[in-house]
């Protein structure tokens, strides 16, 4: 199968973004969606000829940026095992990617009931949040939905609630200090070079990570859940024009990074259903030395 013809779906929602905390230039360059919007996306592996195909279809280059992502968790992986992905993105700030609601029939219990309390902080009963497999792990339905929380106070409240820790008022608007106080550790850090194309209401990101993995994404941003099917149709149409195979799931950069550099963490997440086996998705780029 041609790498450019391999694709997978996901649906994400963003909410509670604090525009005042994000530089305007960073928002423009990164193409960040508006607050409360829903991101509908299709991942694909691409060949060098993809940019020529996009231009031939009328797409225009909208940006060429590089940024570093740093991800944080407890030493025993409590956040990621609970399907919560806390990162600091260069030029954007802190973001928390987490499920907005439980999928039908899903167990919404967190994987641990013990509070995380490395520094004698005030403890509260750990809160349970909805879980669902990242990138559709173990599901026939190719769509997943995630909320992207960017308001610092909401990030601190959600992480503290999940870990069963009541943080001091002085920390509730400062994610960096809360991360330090909670004893969270960096478990992933990588740089992505992104070339962004726009084609009408669609955007196409071509990402090359500094650990040897390249993945593309076609994205539409909508305001309402009922607009998602129409957005999917638009993306599917562009996918057909570019020759995508919608049946093959493609892992994101994080899956491949953990597979390559943090195998113990990766295997724990696979066993918990948070990630799929990278080899099952045909991510041959991620297997390179």
Image (spheres, rainbow, N blue to C red):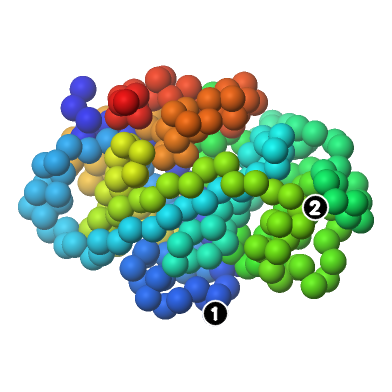
Q: Is residue 8 left or right of residue 119?
A: left
Mark found first going from the N terminus, 2 or 1: 1
Q: Report x, y in % for residue 139.
A: 53, 26
Q: Is residue 288 left or right of residue 118?
A: left
Q: Quadrant of residue 211?
A: top left
Q: Mark on residue 20? A: 1
Q: Report x, y in % for residue 71.
A: 56, 48
Disc 2/disc 1 C-alpha distance (Å): 25 Å
Q: Report x, y in % for residue 154.
A: 70, 63
What residue is at 47 percent from the left and 28 percent from the top?
A: 259
What residue is at 33 percent from the left and 68 percent from the top?
A: 29
Q: Is residue 215 left or right of residue 162?
A: left
Depicted 185 relative to depicted 1: above or below: below
What residue is at 54 percent from the left and 79 percent from the top?
A: 20
Question: Quick one: SS at disc 2?
Answer: helix
How packed mark 2 is, by other alpha carbons closer than 10 Å (few <14, some 14-19, many 20 or more), is many
In the picture, the quarter occupied by the N terminus is top left
Q: Mark on residue 161? A: 2
Q: Report x, y in % for residue 22.
A: 50, 73
């Amino acid at each position: 199968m041609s790498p450019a013809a391999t694709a997978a779906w996901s649906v994400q929602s963003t909410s509670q973004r604090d525009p005042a905390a994000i530089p305007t230039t960073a928002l423009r360059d990164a193409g960040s969606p508006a607050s409360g919007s829903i991101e509908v996306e299709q991942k694909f592996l691409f060949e060098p000829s993809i940019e020529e195909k996009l231009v031939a279809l009328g797409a225009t280059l909208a940006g060429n940026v590089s940024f570093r992502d740093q991800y944080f968790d407890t030493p025993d992986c409590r956040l990621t095992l609970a399907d919560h992905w806390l990162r600091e993105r260069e030029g954007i700030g802190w973001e928390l990617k987490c499920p907005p609601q439980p999928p039908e029939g899903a167990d919404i219990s967190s994987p641990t009931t013990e509070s995380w309390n490395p520094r004698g902080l005030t403890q509260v009963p750990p809160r349970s949040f909805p879980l669902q497999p990242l990138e559709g792990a173990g599901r026939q339905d190719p769509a997943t939905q995630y909320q992207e929380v960017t308001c610092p106070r909401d990030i601190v409240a959600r992480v503290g609630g999940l870990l069963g820790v009541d943080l001091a008022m002085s920390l509730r608007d400062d994610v960096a200090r809360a991360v330090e106080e909670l004893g969270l550790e960096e478990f992933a850090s990588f740089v992505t070079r992104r070339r962004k194309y726009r084609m009408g209401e669609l955007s196409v990101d071509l990402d090359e990570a500094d650990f040897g993995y390249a993945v593309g994404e076609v994205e539409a941003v909508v305001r309402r859940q009922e607009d998602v099917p129409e957005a999917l149709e638009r993306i599917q149409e562009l996918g057909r024009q570019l020759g995508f195979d919608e049946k093959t799931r493609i892992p994101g950069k994080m899956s491949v990074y953990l597979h390559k550099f943090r195998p113990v963490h990766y295997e724990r997440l696979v066993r918990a259903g948070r990630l799929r086996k990278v080899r099952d998705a045909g991510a041959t780029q991620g297997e390179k030395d």
